[in-house]
Each structure stands twice: as C-alpha cells, then as structure tokens.
Amino acid sequence: MFRQIAILLLVAFAFLMFYIRVAPSDPGRWHVTLTFTHNETLQAAARRMFDGDKERLAALDRVIRDTPRTRVLAGSLEEGHITYVTRSLVMGFPDYTTVQLTDGTIRLFGRARFGQSDLGVNAARLDGWLETLGQG
C-alpha cells in the first residue's frame, strides 16, 4: 500500500512539473497597464519605477533580453510597453515582468505565477536589472 501511494505521489508531482513548464501564458492576463506610484516589494511580486525615456527603455530591454531563460510575451519597444517571461532554472517556474514607459517614468512589475511567495526572486531580479542599468 505504501508503495502504491508513493508511486501515485511521484506521478502527481511529475504531472505538476510538466504542467508548470507547458501551461500557456495568456498575454491578456499578464500584459497589463501599470499605474502604481511607488516602489514596493510584495510577497510574490515587486514594483519599481524611475525617470526614463525611450533610450533608457531600450537599454533596459537589452539588459532584460540578456537574462537567461527570458523571452518577450507581449508588447514592443515601439509601444513602450513590454511583458517578459523568465523561467527558473531547475523547476521552470514562470515569472512575468511588465515594463512600461509613461510620461517620463519607466515602471517595472515582476510577479510570480505560481505560489504564495517568490522568496524575493522578483525584487532581486528587478534590482539587478536596475543596477546593471545604473539605476540601482
């Protein structure tokens, strides 16, 4: 009986890991308009903002695209609004980061898709990008 339960748990875990890696990312859910007015670190997310223009946005985009396991989900530099997906190395958990330039302010919103906490990963990622950009 113990062996059957162990096998069932292993199969359930494998299915969960498979789902995390292949679950579709809906741009309508993740590519959102950013309106926050201050920096904040949350339990499973982080918000950062700084003064910027199209050139700073393009520089930030290059930094983000150089991040391993990161790809564009929606948006473009021309729109001044881009959402990226970054996956964790081992488990492949997706985190979504939206970047938006509005009225001379660049806003970044990084958040986890799964779980109640990201253990500070999104805040560290955003702060690392900003440090690379010279904004940290």
Image (spheres, rainbow, N blue to C red):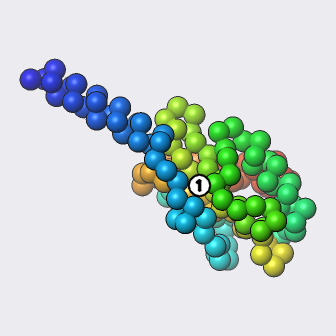
Residue at the image point whose x is 61% and y is 50% from the top: 85
Q: Quadrant of residue 97?
A: bottom right
Q: Quadrant of the N terminus?
A: top left
Give residue 112's position: percent from left, percent from top: 52, 53
Q: Which residue is mark 1?
A: 96
Q: Quadrant of residue 34?
A: bottom right
Q: Nearer the viewer, residue 87 or 128?
A: 87
Q: Nearer the viewer, residue 84 or 2?
A: 84
Vertical position of residue 90 compared to residue 130: above or below: above
**Residue 131 visible in the shown view:** no
Query: In the displayed structure, does residue 51 sit left or right of residue 107?
Result: right
Give residue 61's position: percent from left, percent from top: 79, 54
Label 1, secondary structure: give it: strand
Query: In the displayed structure, does residue 132 sit left or right of residue 123?
Result: right
Query: In the displayed structure, does residue 7 sit left or right of residue 79?
Result: left
Residue at the image point whose x is 28% and y is 28% from the top: 10
Residue reaching furthest to the top: 3
Q: Nearer the viewer, residue 71 or 53?
A: 71
* Residue type, mark 1 in image: Tyr
Give residue 18's position: percent from left, percent from top: 41, 36
Residue reaching furthest to the left: 1
